[in-house]
Each structure stands twice: as structure tokens, then as C-alpha cells.
Image: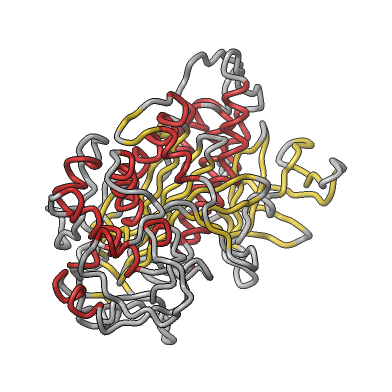
Amino acid sequence: MKNALALLTAFWFAVPIALPAQPLAEDPHVAEALHLLETWVDAERAYNEIPGVSMAVVADQELVWSDGFGHADPEQQTPATPQTRYSICSVSKLFTSIGVLQLRDEGHFELNDDVGTLLPWFDIQQTHPDSPAITVEGLLTHSAGLPRESDYPYWTGPDFPFPERAAIIQELEEQETLYPAARYFQYSNLGLTLAGEIVTEVSGQSYADYVQERILGPLDLADTAPRIPDVGPATRMAAGYSAMTREGERDRVPPFDARGITPAAGFSSTVEDLARFASWQFRLLEAGGTEVLDANTLREMHRVHWMDPDWDVAWGLGFAVRRSDDRTVVRHGGSCPGYRTEFAMQPDRKLGAVVMANANGVNVGSFAAQAFAILGPAIEKAQADAEATTASDASPDLARYTGTYDQSPWWGELEVLPWDGGLAMVSLPSDAPLEALDKLRHVEGHTFRRVRDNDELGETVVFEVDSDGTVTGLRRHSNVYERLP
């Protein structure tokens, strides 16, 4: 977790040097941004008592950063790492959608084909006589009017009784449509399960064999599979935990097998494997041609194909699509018993973020959003200055002030870190650490002043130093904050 801080010590507080063709993580601006991101993630995990979090950030074809925080299995004290496996839950739907589009491109069917013509046993009761046909596109955009689930209580603990494929097919004739097709967005695990059944029916292979042979194998996603391994060191599979109870505890969640719902929610993976999955998409969009999927088909998947009448929900083919801070984000989240996952890309930046946590009730989307907000500008600056990047000539003494200071009982902690050639401080935990960041300007000795948004100087911050030269605390507004070990 401290790798970014080590990079900062080596590069930020150094004499001016040229840094040609260096890895992005070694660029001083990226290194300082990584230090802020790592510090924030570590605090969020701890203050929210999340057992484990793994994250990765990829810029085009470069894995900029990956790390693990906390424990994959707290009972065994197994640390979470970038190689820890998690259930990725509904992110599984992306692989199912790719399989459907591969077969469409091969001419087996069209997106506007009736699902009933592809699945002879598709006999759900259509309760809306004026409904148009339920189409393949309707499945991929969650606009088919189907109920959310197959009619089994598989999200109910403690056993999570996911049905077998035959049971799903048998029960379908007893189920009814919820809305007319092409009327509303209704997220549907049943719909993407049926999309997986189309893959099986048309290809003549089992679903698992198809995705392994046609998608996972060619993309070298060795740690991604259409199954959930047993928890343990040998499999690197994290143990799952519940959302926080009223008593402030998380309960261990028994392992589950998605069985017939696997195309919608049954995959496992690692953050580094899904980072490779993002890199493949950036590469394909840039190079064109065909690599597992036709580049134009991937663009088609990233485009909005369904917009709800209230404009609140936009969906591509398999992917969710939204606008955030004037940028398009193409993404999918996942939530299964004991696990949360977020897979998000900003295609215009060729920037991707992957977050996995082994607990429910965790807003993993906020982790990805902070990765974009904190690292995105730093990576763009590093790329723009790649031909002649020069490290700051800031005094090496600044490094001695960085660290964590106690703000209790008013807040958790105050982190002082390198920023923009100098120092900055941020209170943690924080919903928006970049916005909460206060820059400091050196005045003299151990004295700094806060830099206001208009670049004028604010209050004084004085670091307290003992007779050995060790920084022991800081004084702000006449209050002393002790430095923590």
C-alpha cells in the first residue's frame, strides 16, 4: 500500500532529472496522486470496516497501479492483494453480452429477432397483448419487460438456493411479463440468463465451454472463470461478508454457486484480470479490426441503445452508460452474497478502474470515481509532458512532514502528503478527498501557510519538532495534532 509513497521519496524530493519513457506510476505527478488515492482507500476501508478491497487502474495498455487493502479472509489473516479472486457478480453479464454479439456478427441472428425463435422453450406468459416482441436487444438492454429474476429465492440466505438450468426453463412458463417490451428499463437477471441460453442454443456448446474458448482464453484472462471457487489460499478466493448490521458487525456469508444464473451473476475474477479486459477494449477501439470481437461491434456495445422515458437510465448492449463530469463512463457493477464489484472505463481517456470488495453494503462505485478524479488529471499531465518531464527541486526536508496526524475526537485523521511540488493536507475519511485537499506553502523553518482557492495565503500551520529533529505534531488554529506512528 505504501509503494506510491516510496516512489515519491525517490522522485518528488530529488534534484531535477529527465524522465524519458518512464512508467506512468513513476511520474512525480502520478506518484503523488497515487499516494493520495492509496491513503484515501485505506482510510475508507478501515473506517467502514470493510474486510478487504482490491483495486486496479489501467491507462490504455499500461497497468498503472494495483493493490490490496485489508484481508481476503480475516479469520485466516490472509491479506487482500491484486491477485485475490472475488465474485464479480453482474459484471459476468459483460462476457455473456460479448458472446451474444459474436454470434450475431457471425450471422446466426439479428438483434431485433424474437427470443422465442431462438429458444423454442421460451414460453413466459405475455400479459400485455399489445406488447411488441421480446427481442435479443431487449435482453441486452434490460428493456424486454421481463421480471427481474427467475422465480426462485436465490438471493435469500443462508443457503442462496440458485436453480439449475432445467429448473429455470421449467419455471418460465409459470412466470409473467412485468411490462410490455420496449416500454421501461427493468434490470433483469432472468433476461441475461436467457441471453446465455441463446449462446448455448446457437453455438451448440455449453455456456462455460463457449466463454472459455471464445472469450476468456483468447484474452488471456486466466483468473476469470464462469464459476465461484472455494474460499481458501489455494484458490486465492476471498471470503464474503454481509452488509454492516445495526450492531456494527459484518457476518460471514456462506459460499454460493450461481448454477443456472451463471451467465448473469456467476463469474469470478481479479482486479488485474479485469484491468486486462479494459486494456483489450481500448486496444480494439484504437486499432480497429477484429480481436475476439469486431471493433465496430464493441463501439456499438458502448453506445446508448436504451434511454428510459425519464432520461435517468441509459444502457448500451450489456454495458451501462452514463455521463459524469462531462465524460462518458461505460461500466457495470456487481453485487452478490458477500461481494461487490465495479468495472468502469472512460473511453476518451483510455482510463479504467476496477474495484472489488468482499462485503455487501459497500459503495465500490465511489472508489472508482475517486480513482478517475484523482488519477485522471495526473495521468493526462504525465502523458502531455512525457517528452521532457522534470522533477521538482522542492526541498528534500519536506518529506519529513508527511504522515498521519490525530484529529480525534472531531475527525478521524489528518494526512499530510506531497502535492504539486510542496505539501497538502486532507482530513480522512472523506467523500471527496481531492476537493477536501488543502495545499500548504512553505514560509520558513517548520512554518507553512494554507493556500486559499484564490492563491492567497490563509492560516499558519507549524510542525512541531523534538530535539532529535523528529516531527511530532502540527499546530493549526492554536490546536495541536499529534503525529501518529
In this rendered view, identify the residue nearer to me: 149 or 435: 149
Q: In this view, does 199 lie above or below 174?
A: above
Q: Residue at x 47, y 38 (%)?
A: 4
What is the total number of numbered labels drawn onto the structure image? 0
- Look at the image and name its color scheme: secondary structure
In this rendered view, identify the residue nearer to me: 420 or 250: 250
x and y percent of residue 267 in the render? 25, 57
Q: Is residue 426 above or below residue 349?
A: below
In this rendered view, identify the residue nearer to me: 51 or 460: 51
Residue 10 in the figure: left or right of residue 77: right
Q: Quadrant of residue 388?
A: top right
Q: Residue at x 23, y 78 (%)?
A: 160
x and y percent of residue 209 in the render? 14, 48
Q: Quadrant of residue 245?
A: bottom left
Q: Which residue is drawn at 50% across and 58% down?
A: 365
Q: In this view, does 143 lie above or below 399?
A: below
x and y percent of residue 469 in the render? 58, 40
x and y percent of residue 253 in the render? 26, 75
Q: Residue at x 45, y 59 (%)?
A: 141
Residue 435 in the figure: left or right of residue 351: right
